[in-house]
Image: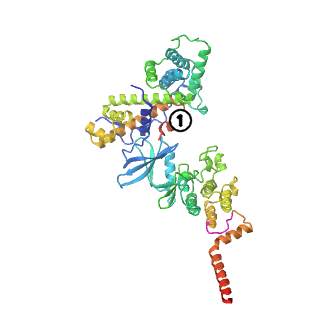
């Protein structure tokens, strides 16, 4: 019988890798392959908020924002920007945003010194989806710089977590578990466990357990993504409290 | 995938922060309140058929164990009792405690209770703090929002999240507490806090509970408890309580040197009934005397 790690005692979080270094930490690695993996993880976590930030805050066109986002991350890898991050001086998110501001300002001053497509990030970026999000969910006016970046970063983090959970559930035959989370927490097309139980033809206790599993796994994925996107244990804990202490 | 709307995001954040109670005997009823470190939920204990309060931190944190251990040492009628400590399947620790129905002290203060009623509650709060100190535990965050007044007038000190052993130094420079109720040495991050840090907070609570303006003796008691130099404060919470009890009993308080007029006023207040009786008797004798002469 296959071992079902997620129903073993203590649950998945009992095995939560506390000692795993974050991607930001790994940018200081002497191993070039590890640095590249770390860089890819950072790009994955931050490219979409960076793109939206350039579009909204810097009022750049779709094409310019694409170029600037790609060029920023390409230059960050080339110059190893993120190695300079010091957790004692604030959050990695804040540091990255300041680097981004400086980069965009420099590019503007250099009057398009950067040719379009001249600096491509090593990780493929789906700008169409980012632009589509901006069109379908316009960002409210009057929002502060820090808040804008944070809001879009959280949105990207949770979207990635939902997609990761969906893939995991498909791979492990737990589509029903994901469907409960999708219907009850995400879309709210189900208003109660009873309704879900009736519509799925399952006992309420099964719905409760399956939804609890999906939430538990979702939480673990969110925290794992957060750990990759933060520069120190303290920053991770601070960000996690802010993210999950919403009441 | 379509982007998450703000509403969907809020629901998912809540779903990810809800305690996973599937392996416990509790079912979620509602959220009771939340702070920077954790959230308190009202849950139903299905085994015993009663509602209790369950506290869980937002993320895994060993501090939860220390908090529960501190609370477990404190069995006292004015300290919220701990029922159980455990671990959820999502990895977080939790503990359950008595669910106190009633009002927070700041809400109670806005109600119709008299100053004397409030002072009697204050003496009970000092009793809880004094008991904790005798068990080697410092609360460090005493304030009206952390004190509940039950529906039968019982008072319970809650939220021992910042409690620490009295004989254990805090790391230098580490500041925790609520600024308005924090002793100067606590605000400075002094590592050698003792029970006088809680005495300071109690002095602030006393000032909050007094009438406005407060009577002079109580103002002096509060000022002594809140002295900047801890050497000038009451050494123990029980000494502070004793001075407030002296005031309630109509005796002079140790923190205040009375003027002769104040002493006379206090004597009059204490003996008002006797004086009225004597005056009534004198008036009657006077009337009888003149009636007899007439």
**Residue B87 horizontal/vertical position (percent):** 42, 46
- Outermost residue, front side: B294
**Residue A35 visible in the snapshot:** no
Circle 1 packing at 10 Å, graded few (<14), some (14-19), many (20+), is some
Residue B190 in picture, x, y percent from top left? 65, 47
Residue B184 against residue A193 in the figure, above or below: below
Quarter-wise, where is residue B174 in the image? top right
The image quadrant where one finds the C terminus of chain B is bottom right
List the single residue furthest toward the left. Answer: A201
Color scheme of the displayed model = rainbow
- Residue tagged 1: A233
Residue placed farthest to the right in the image? B260
Looking at the picture, how far across and down is residue A229, in whole percent? Answer: 50, 29
Whether the magenta-drawn stretch holds residue B251 is answered as yes
Which residue shows up at 49% across the image and 48% down it? Answer: B65
Q: Is mark 1 on a helix, strand or loop?
A: helix
Q: Is residue B76 left or right of residue A198?
A: right
Q: Which residue is drawn at 33% across and 29% down?
A: A170
Asked whether residue B158 is drawn in magenta, I would say: no
Front position in the image: B2 or B214: B214
Q: Is residue A37 left or right of residue B206?
A: left
> Residue A110 location, x and y as percent?
61, 13
- The one of A26 and B5 positioned closer to us in this rendering: B5
**Residue B259 in view in this figure:** yes
Q: In this view, does A98 lie above or below B268?
A: above
Lateral position of residue B64 relative to residue B214, left or right: left
Query: Mark 1 falls within which chain?
Result: A
Which contiguous range is marked in magenta?
B248-254
Figure quadrant of the N terminus of chain B: top left
Instruction: Give the overall secondary structure of the magenta segment.
Output: loop
Tell me the residue at 59%/19% (across/down). A103
């Amino acid at each position: 019988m296959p071992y079902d790690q997620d129903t073993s005692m203590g649950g998945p979080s009992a095995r939560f890798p506390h000692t795993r270094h974050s991607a930001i930490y790994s940018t200081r690695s002497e191993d070039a392959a590890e640095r590249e993996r770390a860089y890819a993880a950072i790009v994955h976590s931050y490219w979409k908020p960076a793109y939206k930030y350039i579009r909204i805050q810097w009022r750049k066109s779709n094409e310019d924002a694409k170029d600037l986002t790609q060029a920023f991350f390409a230059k960050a890898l080339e110059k190893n920007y993120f190695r300079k991050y010091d957790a004692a001086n604030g959050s990695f998110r804040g540091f990255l945003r300041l680097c981004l501001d400086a980069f965009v300002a420099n590019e503007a001053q250099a009057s398009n010194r950067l040719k379009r497509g001249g600096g491509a990030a090593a990780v493929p970026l789906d700008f169409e989806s980012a632009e589509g999000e901006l069109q379908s969910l316009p960002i409210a006016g009057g929002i502060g710089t820090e808040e804008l970046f944070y809001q879009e970063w959280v949105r990207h983090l949770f979207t990635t977590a939902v997609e990761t959970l969906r893939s995991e559930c498909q791979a492990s035959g737990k589509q029903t578990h994901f469907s409960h989370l999708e219907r009850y927490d995400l879309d709210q097309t189900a208003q109660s466990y009873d309704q879900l139980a009736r519509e799925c033809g399952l006992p309420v206790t099964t719905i409760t357990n399956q939804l609890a599993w999906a939430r538990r796994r979702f939480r673990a994925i969110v925290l794992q993504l957060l750990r990759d996107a933060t520069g120190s244990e303290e920053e991770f804990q601070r960000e996690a409290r802010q993210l999950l202490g919403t009441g | 995938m379509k982007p998450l709307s703000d509403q969907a995001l809020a629901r998912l954040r809540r779903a990810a922060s809800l305690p996973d109670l599937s392996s416990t005997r509790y079912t979620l009823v509602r959220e009771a309140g939340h702070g920077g470190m954790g959230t308190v939920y009202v849950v139903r204990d299905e085994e015993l058929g009663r509602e209790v309060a369950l506290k869980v931190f937002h993320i895994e944190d060993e501090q939860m164990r220390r908090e529960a251990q501190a609370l477990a040492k404190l069995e006292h009628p004015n300290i919220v009792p701990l029922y159980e400590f455990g671990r959820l399947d999502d990895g977080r620790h939790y503990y359950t405690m008595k669910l106190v129905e009633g009002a927070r002290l700041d809400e109670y203060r806005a109600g119709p209770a008299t100053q004397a009623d409030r002072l009697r509650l204050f003496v009970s709060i000092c009793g809880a703090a004094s008991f904790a100190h005798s068990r080697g535990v410092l609360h460090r965050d005493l304030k009206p929002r952390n004190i509940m007044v039950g529906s039968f007038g019982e008072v319970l000190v809650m939220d021992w999240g910042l409690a620490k052993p009295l004989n254990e130094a805090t790391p230098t420079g580490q500041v925790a507490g609520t600024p308005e109720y924090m002793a100067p040495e606590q605000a400075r991050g002094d590592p050698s806090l003792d029970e006088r840090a809680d005495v300071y907070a109690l002095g602030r609570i006393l000032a909050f509970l007094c009438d406005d303006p407060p009577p002079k003796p109580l103002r002096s008691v509060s000022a002594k408890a809140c002295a900047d130099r801890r050497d000038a404060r009451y050494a123990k919470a029980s000494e502070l309580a004793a001075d407030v009890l002296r005031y309630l009993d109509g005796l002079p308080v140790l923190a205040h040197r009375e003027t002769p007029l104040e002493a006379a006023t206090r004597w009059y207040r204490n003996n008002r009934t006797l004086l009225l009786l004597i005056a009534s008797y004198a008036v009657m004798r006077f009337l009888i005397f003149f009636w007899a002469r007439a």
